[in-house]
Amino acid sequence: MLVRALRLFRTAAPASRLCPCATGRTQHYCSPAKTISVRDALTSLDTGSNIRIRGWLRSVRSQKNHLFLHVSDGSSLQPLQVVANSDINTRGLTFGCAVDVTGSLEKSPSQKQRVELQAQHVEVVGECNPVDFPFKIKERHSLEYIRQFPHLRCRTNSFSSLLRIRSEATAAIHSYFRDNGFVQIHTPIITSNDCEGAGELFQVEPSGNEHSLDKENPHFFSVPAYLTVSGQLHLEVMAGAFPAVYTFGPTFRAENSQSRRHLAEFYMVEAEISFIESLEDLMKVMEDLFKTSTEHLLSQCAEDMGLFHKFISPGQREKVDLMLKSSFNVISYTEAIDILSRNSEKFTFKTEWGCDLQTEHEKFLVKHCGNVPVFVTDYPYDLKPFYARDNQDQPQHTAAAVDLLVPGVGELCGGSLREERLELLKTRLARAGLEDTYAWYLQLRQFGSVPHGGFGMGFERYLQCVLGVNNIKDTIPFARSSRSCLL
C-alpha cells in the first residue's frame, strides 16, 4: 500500500527553536524530536519541547484554519490532540489509520486538555478504509459486538482499557506476593497429574505418527500427559523448601461449556504456604490479595476503571467500594445449606447437605450476606479432592476447605489445608486406587513434612468481579472455549 507523507511546513522556525550558536548557512535545532508515548506527552511539563508521537487516529476534525487529530497509542485512554494547518493534504487521514507526527508540545488553550501537539510533520504510516473498518468513529460498540473481531477489538476504547487493566492487575498480584515474601515458581504446563480429579483434561501427543513407532508405549512422554488444570501439586513440592510460593499462568479445562462463566484456557493465581494450620490464616491471605490488588487498580488505572464503571457496568464502583471497606463474611457449608434450604423454592438445583453448590446458590449466598464477599468453609469430605485435610468430625465428616464467593460471579477462589498426615493420605489414595500414581506425593509427607495449605484464584473471574463484566470471554485477549478457537 502506498505510504503518503503529509507535510506541514512553516515559512521559518521560531528563533527560540534554533541553537543560539548556529552560524553560517547551516542551522541546527537545539534538540531533535524525542519519541514519547501519548501518556507521557499528556503528563509532560516540558512544553515547547520537540516531540514525536506514533499511534492511530481516533478522530479527525477540520475547521477553517486548523485540522484537529486525536492520536492514541494504547498507553492511555485519553488521546493526544494534534493541531495542524488546514491546508495540508488530508487524503489518507481517516479514523483508524496509523500516523507518525512530529511537532512542538504546547500548552492548550482549551479546558478539555492541558497540552496539545502543534504539528510540523504528519505522515500516514498505514491507511485505514473507514467504510470497511468494522468500528465506526461516532458509535459506541458493545462488548458483544466487538467480540466478533478478536484481531481488531484491541483498537476500541473499551478493550484497550481492559488490556491495560489486565496488565496492571498482573503487576499488582506479582507485587503483592513479592512484598509478602513469596517465591514465584514456574510450574509446568504439560503434566502427568490430574490435580482436580475431574477428568476434564486436554491430552498432549504429537500430531504426526512418527513418534508412535513403539507399539508397547505409544506416548511421547512415555506416560499419558496433559495440559495442566492446576499448578498446585507442583507448588506443594516447592513448599517443602520455601515457606511461601506462588505461580501465575495459564491453565486448561476441557469442559464442554459455552457459558458466560467458562473458558477452556484461562489464567490462575495459585499460592501455597507452609507452617499454616488454620483456614483463618489462609483466608486472610486471600482477602488481602483481593483488596490490595483492587486498591492498586483503582489508584493506577482510574481512567480505565472509570470507563467500565460508567459505561459498561453502572453502579459497579459502589459495589467495589463496599467490598473493599467491609470485612469478608465467613459461614460454614452447613450454615450455607441451612440458608439455601429455607429458600429452596428459588433454585433449580437441590439444596441438601452433601450436594455441591451451584452458581445460583453461590450468588444467592453473596446477596444474603449483603453483597459482600463470603467465605464458605468446611465442605463435605467426599466433595473435595484427596489432598484436602480431613477434619475428622464424624458423623458429618467435613474437609478443611474454603471457597470465596463474590458478587456477580460466585466462586472466585478455592483452597484448603492439605492433608499432611501420611496414614490418612495413604488410606484415601488407596481407596481411590491412586496410591501408586501418587507415590511421589506420599514421599513429600515422609521427608520433613509440615502443615501447609493453599488456594487458587481465577484471574479472569477476578476481572469480572472488579469491572462488572458479564461475560468472561470479554476479560481475556483471545478467548478459547468449547467450539471456539479463533486465531
Image (tube, rainbow, N blue to C red):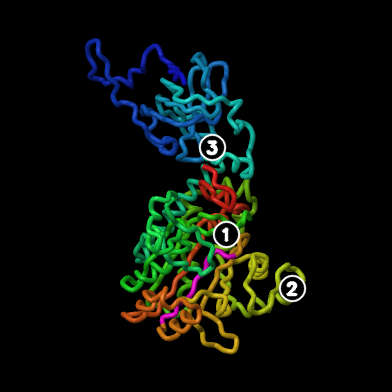
Q: Amino acid at mark 1?
A: Glu
Q: Is residue 165 above or below residue 456?
A: above
Report helix, strand or loop for mark 3. loop
Q: CA distance from mark 1 to mark 3?
A: 27 Å
Residue position marked by numbered label 3 in the rendering:
152
Q: Residue 113's x, y, as percent?
A: 51, 34
Crowd rating for badge 1 (residues with CA inside 10 Å; few <14, some 14–19, many 20+) = some
Quarter of image, res 382: bottom right
* Image depth: mark 1 or mark 3 in front: 1
Report helix, strand or loop for mark 1. loop
| Residue 434 visible in the picture | yes
Judge from the rendering whether residue 9 lies leftward or rightward of residue 472; answer left or right: left
Residue position marked by numbered label 2 in the rendering:
344
Please tell me which of labels 1 and 3 falls first in the chain. Answer: 3
Q: Is residue 6 above or below residue 196?
A: above
Please tell me which of labels 1 and 2 falls first in the chain. Answer: 1
Q: Is residue 109 above or below residue 241?
A: above
Residue position marked by numbered label 1 in the rendering:
255
Q: Nearer the viewer, residue 32 or 173?
A: 173
Q: Residue 75's x, y, as percent?
A: 45, 40
Q: Amino acid at mark 2?
A: Ser
Q: Amino acid at mark 3?
A: Leu
Q: Residue 318's x, y, as percent?
A: 61, 57
Q: Residue 273's x, y, as percent?
A: 40, 72
Was residue 122 drawn as part of the magenta stretch in this picture?
Answer: no
Q: CA distance from mark 2 to mark 3?
A: 45 Å
Residue at 40% in and 55% down: 212
